[in-house]
Image (cartoon, grey):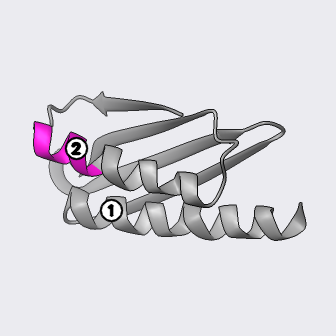
Amino acid sequence: MQINIHQIQIDIDSKLKELIEKKVTKLNHFSDKIEYVDVYLKLETNHHQINDKSVEIKLHIPKHECFSKSISKSFEYSIDEAIDSVTAQLKKLKERY
């Protein structure tokens, strides 16, 4: 599985990258058919003030795609919420097929 981390107008530290890679790698427990995962990190602005951190996860499986977006005050919390949502989607896919 290939993990692509896209930082939109921000720089993140290595600890956050390691956290993302660790959590995304755990998704292999739910499906071994994951081809690649795109993780987008960006800051949500409101009237030129940075308010929240946004994380989007796009997970690509043959014939399927899972997507989750989470916005909160910290990247860590947003990552956890987005991973939980993608995990639920993977479980549903596994039940169907």
x then y, percent, for residue 20: 31, 48
* Residue plotted at (48% across, 69% down): 84
* Residue plotted at (42% across, 61% down): 70
- Disc ID at residue 78: 1
The amino acid type found where label 1 is placed reads Ser
- In the picture shown, does residue 74 fall above or below 49? below
Location of residue 63 (image quadrant): top right
Q: Secondary structure at mark 2?
A: helix
Mark 2 vs mark 1: give the one in front.
2
In-image side of 60 versus 69 (left or right): right
The secondary structure that most of the magenta stretch takes on is helix
**Total labels drawn:** 2
- In the picture shown, does residue 77 fall above or below 7? below
x then y, percent, for residue 58: 56, 43
Residue 40 visible in rendering: yes
Q: Secondary structure at mark 1?
A: helix
In-image side of 21 versus 26 (left or right): left
Give the position of the C terminus as an image quadrant.
bottom right
Report if the CB atoms under discs 2 and 1 are less than 8 Å apart: no
Give the position of the N terminus as an image quadrant.
top right
What are the residue bounds of the magenta stretch? 13-19
The amino acid type found where label 2 is placed reads Glu
- Disc ID at residue 37: none
Residue sitting farthest toward the right: 97
x then y, percent, for residue 49: 14, 50
Is tag 2's residue or tag 1's residue first in the polypeptide sequence?
Answer: 2
* Residue plotted at (41% across, 68% down): 81
- Disc ID at residue 18: 2
